[in-house]
Image (cartoon, rainbow, N blue to C red):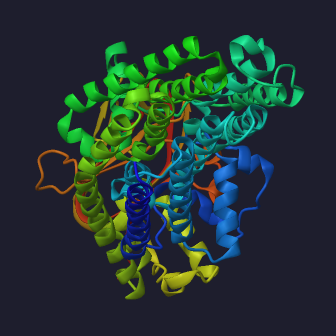
Amino acid sequence: MSASRSSFGGVIAWGVWATLFAAALFFVAHYASNVPSWDDWDMIPTLTRNQPVTWDWLWSQHNEHRVPVPRLIFLGLNRLTLVDMRVTMYFDVLVMAALAAAMMLTAARLRGRPGAEDAFFPLVLLHWGQAANLLWGWQLQFFASVALACVALLSIVRAGTTVPVRRAAVTVGVCALLLPLCGANGLGMVPALAAWPLALALLPEDWSGGTNTRGSRVIAALGVGALALTALYFIGWERVPYHPKSQSVYQSLKTSVQFATIGLGPATRNSWPLSGLATLAALGVTTLLLIRVWRDRPAERARVAGLLCFLAALGSLALGLGLGRNGFETRYVTLALPAWCALYFAWVLYGDRARRWAPAALTLASLAALWGNTVFGVDYARELRGQLGGFERDLAAGVPLHQLLHRYGPWLHPHQDMPQRYLPMLKRARVGNYTALQLDPPFRVVPLDLHPVETTQLSWHDSTARVFGPRPALLFRLPGDRVVQGIRLRYRYRSDDGTLPYIGLRWKPGSQAEFAPERFYKYSPTGDRANWERGTWDTIHDSATTLTVWISDTIREVGITPDFRPAVFKIDELSLLVPED
């Protein structure tokens, strides 16, 4: 190939990188909002300096995750700049652009020239199909683990060529050591990834292919340390109640394949199951290629073993997600994409006659998915911006806090008490437009008579329910219809097995025969583990849990579901919140 043709291919690839990098920055600038959403809220007490930053908090469980590294980055970025949910979003774009550039440079160096097919990397790392992560500040957690995985991958593919194997093993060991500190999404990759530096340090060089690595205490310590940290992760760890679980081995395997497939973007869902079969074929053929190279080319064993361990690490993450998650969840696009980058490098290194067309085929596949990924991203971003942008406009217009929660609650957090308690912290800290937050006027509290008109699968005495069936229910009825702004439930709970509750709250007017799904509110443990029982950081020392749901509705009946398991559920207060006038 002529030098001019090679140079032209490089111009195309870098042109795609620059275009998609600029497009990703525009995407965040145009659609992102400075409005905390879901897990973002758990950062508000520390961001506003209400909650101290301690090791206990950094290491504490957040849902199924331990996330000290993302928490520190989140805090550091916001304190270096300003408290704004968009700071981490821009950071994520910069990280992905830097990774794409590093992979393009590495691929060009490995083959000895740049190529148009290297546009694969920005096409996979910077497309708008990652909207669910790019437009959510908390998803720094996902980008942190992906960045570490990609750095490990770059170290592996450069081992023995541009960097010594020993140095590459140290870098991979450090990445493996940090991955458990980025949540379960990092933890799932650790055992297989840590196996590579351990193999280089412990196995004979004929097997490992390493040079000056056997017996290295540093490399061995990093591998052992990563595995030890993985074990430490589970000390005091608690499964999140009510998270979904896989129903069968087949369902778990199907979910795992879906996870791997969506690494090329949400557009791959449109061609399922063909896209899944193509993914399995690509992974299977690449694995066989690497095994053959390991057998036939002893000088390449270190790098090949690293690539096999890397694919195994992504495979173990996929299997972990397959135990109870939706493989086509669009947030997982970012987590799965390193596997496709590994496939690309495997063929660049060892494809022989397929060295050009296999990477080109991956590039064409990512290019074919680009339009579908973009359409998904725009649709998602418009809906998100429409809702959170409406919140920002109403905030600036002085709409009272309880009305903001009523209108935008599901987009802010599944539990209204979280933003209700933390939005005033943003106001007091004078963060952005939150200085305009209109706090609620006084409400008149109207207690309900704690004598239910109907009970199901529970016994009731002295404001206490003793649940004995899987579908317990309490029904309270007002004398007549009443317009209310909110319902407050204050309760104490103790289950036979120690699990925290799933509380359901329903309401309806007298004209409605049955409870409707849109008039339903639930509470179940989520977010920071320390807050699971009480809901928010500033109420964890309260003697009872308080739930407030802002409904701005007419009601006649209130129904309560006190969990689905044997338990004791005591109501301290069930009240209506009505305007003073």
- List x then y, in percent, for residue 19: 38, 68
Q: Is residue 578 above or below residue 306?
A: below
Q: Nearer the viewer, residue 70 or 413?
A: 70
Q: Nearer the viewer, residue 100 or 277?
A: 100
Q: Is residue 28 above or below residue 154?
A: below
Residue at 83% of width from left, 25% of height from top?
Answer: 212
Q: Nearer the viewer, residue 219 or 361?
A: 361
> In this view of the protein, can residue 224 be seen by the observer?
yes
- List x then y, in percent, for residue 316: 52, 24
Left or right of residue 107: residue 283: left
- List x then y, in percent, for residue 265: 33, 46
Left or right of residue 68: residue 99: left
- List x then y, in percent, for residue 495: 54, 28
Location of the C terminus by quadrant is bottom left
Q: In the picture, residue 202 is in which quadrant? A: top right
Left or right of residue 542: residue 9: left
Q: Is residue 507 above or below residue 221?
A: below
Q: Nearer the viewer, residue 200 or 339?
A: 200
Q: Is residue 83 above or below residue 219?
A: below
Q: How many marks?
A: 0
Residue at 61% of width from left, 74% of height from top?
Answer: 83
> In this view of the protein, can residue 576 be seen by the observer?
no
Residue at 56% of width from left, 22% of height from top?
Answer: 497
